[in-house]
Image (spheres, rainbow, N blue to C red):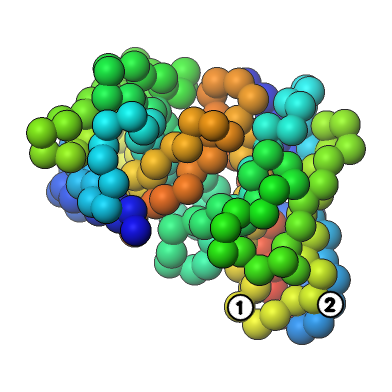
Amino acid sequence: QVQLQESGPGLVKPSETLSLTCTVSGASINNYYWSWIRQPPGKGLEWIAYVYNSGTTDYSPSLKSRVTVSVDTSKSQFSLKMTSVTTADTAVYYCARLWFGELKFDFWGQGALVTVSS
Amino acid sequence: DIQMTQSPSSLSASIGDRVTITCRASQSISNHLNWYQQKRGKAPQVLIYAASYLESGVPSRFSGSRSGTDFTLTISSLQPEDFATYYCQQSYSSPITFGQGTRLEIK
């Protein structure tokens, strides 16, 4: 069974950089697409980006200028960095596998709440 | 960006009811539409992919259909564990977008 686990600071100050890592187990990180999705408290889902082990990436245009995603195949991890955060970036951040056949998110992490506050 | 509009935003129903949730795309997305269920405090889980294909392990009371740019998720007979929020997601073009969600509550 594929399992994903997010890790990183739960509190980030405004204007600083949010950094999260997702550790993948139960499947090779190679040859799949991996994605980040967020959900502000009480609100809906927002896709952030995806990354493939070859370095192929795609970003939401609304976040592209502030976001970088990358893969470390040696650690079976992929990461999210978001710069210049504001309180609007407070959300539960999910990592997920993106099955590229149908572009469905078939496995998800449990989610990590990141609060942006001074 | 392709906008996905779900209706209704919330819905009250009883155990055993047949329930339909609709998702409308702002342009043609062929059948590139997935449905998710999210229970409170949990990550979403895919129910239906490519508009009408049941994800492995999902009960057969869930089904999906398409008519043009309108997509429907149907639950044939509501069970207690089905009370949750449902989201549609288009995978036709980037950026991937979700509907705003439909909250299904117990009547």
Report the residue at 52% width, 57% height from top: B45
Residue flagged by tag 1: what amino acid is it? Glu
Rendered position, B11 above or below B4: below
| Residue A58 in view, yes or no | yes
Rendered position, A82 above or below A114: above
Report the residue at 65% width, 82% height from top: B80
Please report contact status of discs 2 and 1: CB closer than 8 Å, yes or no: no
**Residue A36 placement (x, y as % from top left):** 37, 38
Report the residue at 31% width, 35% height from top: A86
Q: Which element is circle 1 on?
A: helix
Pick the front one: A26 or A85: A26
| Residue B7 in view, yes or no | no
Residue flagged by tag 2: what amino acid is it? Asp
**Residue A17 placement (x, y as % from top left):** 18, 31
| Quarter in which the C terminus of chain A is drawn | top left
**Residue B81 placement (x, y as % from top left):** 61, 78
Query: Which numbered dot is residue B17?
Result: 2
Compare marks 2 and 1 and give the one earlier in the sequence.
2
Report the residue at 54% width, 23% height from top: B95
Using the numbered discs, state the Cα–Cα distance from disc 2 to disc 1 in whole angstroms: 13 Å
Label 2 is found on which chain of the structure? B
Which residue in the protein does label 1 denote?
A: B81
- Mark 1 Cα-neighbour bin, 10 Å: few <14, some 14–19, many ≥20: few
Q: Quadrant of residue A112?
A: bottom left
Label 1 is found on which chain of the structure? B
Pick the front one: A17 or A117: A17
Q: Is residue A110 left or right of residue A74?
A: right
